[in-house]
Amino acid sequence: MQRRQLILLAPALLAAASARAQADKGAQQAEIQAKARQALQDFYKAEPRLKGEVAKAPGYAVFTTFGLSFGLGGAGGKGVAHDNMSKKDTYMNIGQASAGL
């Protein structure tokens, strides 16, 4: 009887985990969008002509970056690439490792 209950419970657990992952993904994407909008506004404020250039461009990308290096190092960030033609966004994580003096 326990095995049958477990088999019936497994799809419900998978569905709940999937829903949570989608909610987390949506929250991360909303955070990335907010940071990208703020970065663009800051750039437009500093250089107003950029707004027209970005609007005419095939697309643009905005990334947050971080890095750390002390012999061994690494860098990475999260961001969004926007296609102005299709109006679609592609969310990305980037990472890099380094070693040296």
Image (spheres, helix red, strand yellow):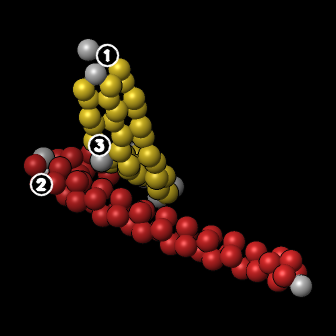
Q: Residues within 10 Å of mark 3 (few under 14, many from 20)?
A: few
* Kind of residue sitting beneath label 2: Lys
Q: Residues within 10 Å of mark 1 (few under 14, many from 20)?
A: few
Real-space CA distance between mark 1 and mark 2, rounded to the nearest whole angstrom: 39 Å
Position of residue 12 measured from the top left corner of the image (x, y, whole percent)? 72, 79
Viewer-side label of 1, 2: 1
Q: Identify the element where label 3 is drawn.
A: loop
Are dots 3 and 1 in contact, CB under 8 Å? no
Are dots 2 and 3 in contact, CB under 8 Å? no
Residue drawn at 46 percent across, 53 percent down: 91
Position of residue 58 measured from the top left corner of the image (x, y, whole percent)? 42, 44
Residues 2 and 81: in front is 2
Whether residue 56 is visible, yes or no, is no
Residues 16 and 44: in front is 16
Residue drawn at 28 percent across, 59 percent down: 35
**Residue to which mark 2 is pinned:** 45
Position of residue 16 measured from the top left corner of the image (x, y, whole percent)? 63, 77
**Residue to which mark 3 is pinned:** 65
Whether residue 42 is visible, yes or no, is yes
Viewer-side label of 3, 1: 1
Q: Residues within 10 Å of mark 2 (few under 14, many from 20)?
A: few
